[in-house]
Image (cartoon, rainbow, N blue to C red):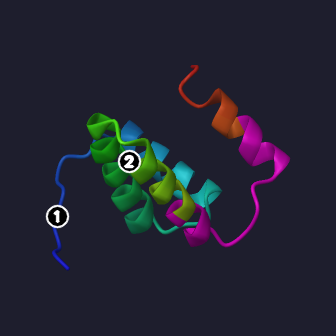
Amino acid sequence: MANITVKGIPEKLYDQLKTRAKRNNRSLNSEIILSIQLHTHRTESNTAKILDLARKAQAMGKGFLDDQGIQLAKSEGRK
């Protein structure tokens, strides 16, 4: 597997990624990889691949999404 270093990440984006990783019981690294994968596949408009990634993301989680996590997910991007 390849490794990369990303420099100059805006503080707000970094905080958002950390929050999402914590909420989804994933490491920051796993959250970043998943975000890149979802963005890449979304631009390809391939529903089957997106569903596969969603299933993999669900498997990465260590627990169930609680009410607070659901509310956070619903309000994400609405601010």
* Farthest-out residue, top: 79
- Please name the residue that numbered disc 1 is placed on: 5
Name the quadrant of the C terminus: top right
Q: Position of residue 2 (x, y in %)?
A: 16, 75
* Farthest-out residue, right: 67
Q: Is residue 13 above or below residue 22?
A: above
Q: Residues within 10 Å of mark 1 (few under 14, many from 20)?
A: few
Range covered by the magenta-colored residues:
56-71
Q: Nearer the viewer, residue 59 or 14?
A: 59
Residue at the image position 18 percent from the left and 56 percent from the top: 6
- Please name the residue that numbered disc 2 is placed on: 38
Of labels 2 and 1, the one closer to you: 2
Residue at the image position 28 percent from the left and 35 percent from the top: 43
Indicate whether residue 78 is drawn in magenta.
no
Name the quadrant of the N terminus: bottom left
Q: Position of residue 15 (x, y in %)?
A: 46, 46
At label 2, the amino acid type is Leu
Q: Nearer the viewer, residue 65 or 4?
A: 65
Please tell me which of labels 2 and 1 falls first in the chain: 1
In this rendering, position of residue 68 left or right of residue 24: right
Q: Position of residue 46 (x, y in %)?
A: 36, 42
In this rendering, position of residue 10 left or right of residue 53: left
Query: Considering the numbered disc 1 on the image, is that residue within a helix, a strand or a loop?
Result: loop
At label 1, the amino acid type is Thr
Q: Position of residue 12 (x, y in %)?
A: 40, 37
Residue at the image position 38 percent from the left and 40 percent from the top: 13
* Farthest-out residue, bottom: 1
